[in-house]
Image (cartoon, rainbow, N blue to C red):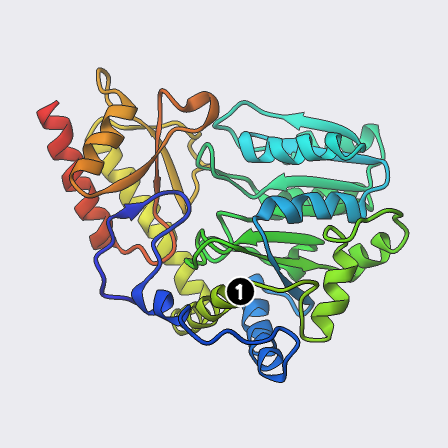
Amino acid sequence: MSEEEIRFFLPGPTYVTEDVRRAMTGPVIGHRSAVFKELYNSLTPRLQQVTRTKGDVMLATSSATLVMESAIRSTVRTDVLNLVCGAFSERWHAISKLVGRQADRVSVPWGEAVDPELVRSALRRKRYEAVTMAHNETSTGVINPLREIAAVVHEESDALVLVDTVSSLAGAPVEVDEWGLDVVLASSQKALAVPPGLTVFTLSERAAEHAAKVDNRGFYTDLLRYRDKHRAAGTITTPAVSILYALDRQLERIAEEGMEVRWERHRELQQLTARWAEANGFVYASADGARSPTVSCLQPPAGTASPDLVQSLAKKGFTIGGGYGDWKPTTLRIGHMGEVRERDLEGLFRAFEEVVSSS
């Protein structure tokens, strides 16, 4: 773990340690060269450990939204079921419609997790090629029961399971192989604690077989093209080599900590936040039992405006997230993920208390 003091608590991008930033100053290398292939091949087994798969784990120089669209274009011909509980799970639905798929949705109110039994009911009404979901809904601080939902999908259908783990991967348990997840995607700038610009994603053999039957997968959105280049130790286009250097260094840190230990640290950070919130009049906007280990979405005490709190903390040198979408005026978000430690959060909470007491 780094000894640097962290005062940056956005729900993404997250704080990047100095050694990871320095790693980006490595030399520019050709992405078809032997030295690049050596770097790329060294990343694969460590990314497999993070995603808990023996299958392909690929990289795209992009935001996760590109891979979300790629997953729909590459694996769905007609019908897809989108599970919606906030702004980013809603994005799956918007993408599915915009690329011309027949997109149905199961929706729950913001702040609640998706009930697996709602998914079961939807799958009994209609056959779908894929089911999409956000494991951790960054806009509301809700974590969905991914394992249970995936089990229901497999019990009731042959649909693919496409999952946004953008703000959960490396901060909460994600078991790609054990849970039967077909496409899992995550951005570099969340719990992985790498600068923005990369998306890590998986593609199961089952999903690849399905994709082979889909016409017009595009060029930059064709997941089979990514897989084929990946298996040749490369990327489909020139990658962000500097960020790959950063990922290389950060994966060393993650391996040193251990995935189970890292998951537990994030869980303890959420519990610390919950105890402080209760003691200081802050209320979780997310339902009890569905609270994310990486992002806490809170309503401040009565009479205190969330945007004012965010601005006052910034003047003290602390960065947190404001509310998102419909919740922008009434909530704030604390990203306790990546390399954040208890002492960092305790420093933030002291600053919070000073701001609230003086308002």
Residue 96 placement: quadrant: top right
**Residue ID at (87%, 56%):** 212
User: Is 111 placed left or right of 271 in the picture?
Assistant: right
- Position of residue 18 relative to residue 76, above or below, is below
**Residue ID at (37%, 67%):** 20
User: Is 187 placed left or right of 346 in the picture?
Assistant: right
**Residue at disc 1, secondary structure:** helix
Q: How many marks?
A: 1
Where does the image place residue 217, in percent across and percent down from the top left?
A: 82, 49
Classify the position of the C terminus by image quarter: top left
**Residue ID at (26%, 31%):** 310
Classify the position of the N terminus by image quarter: bottom left
User: Could you tell me the amino acid type at mark 1?
Assistant: Val
Where does the image place residue 203, in percent across and percent down from the top left?
A: 71, 58
Q: Point out the residue furthest to the left here.
A: 358
User: Is 152 placed left or right of 340 in the picture?
Assistant: right
Residue 127 placement: quadrant: top right
Crowding at mark 1 (Cα within 10 Å: few <14, some 14-19, many 20+) = many
Task: Name the residue beneath numbered marker 1.
Answer: 50
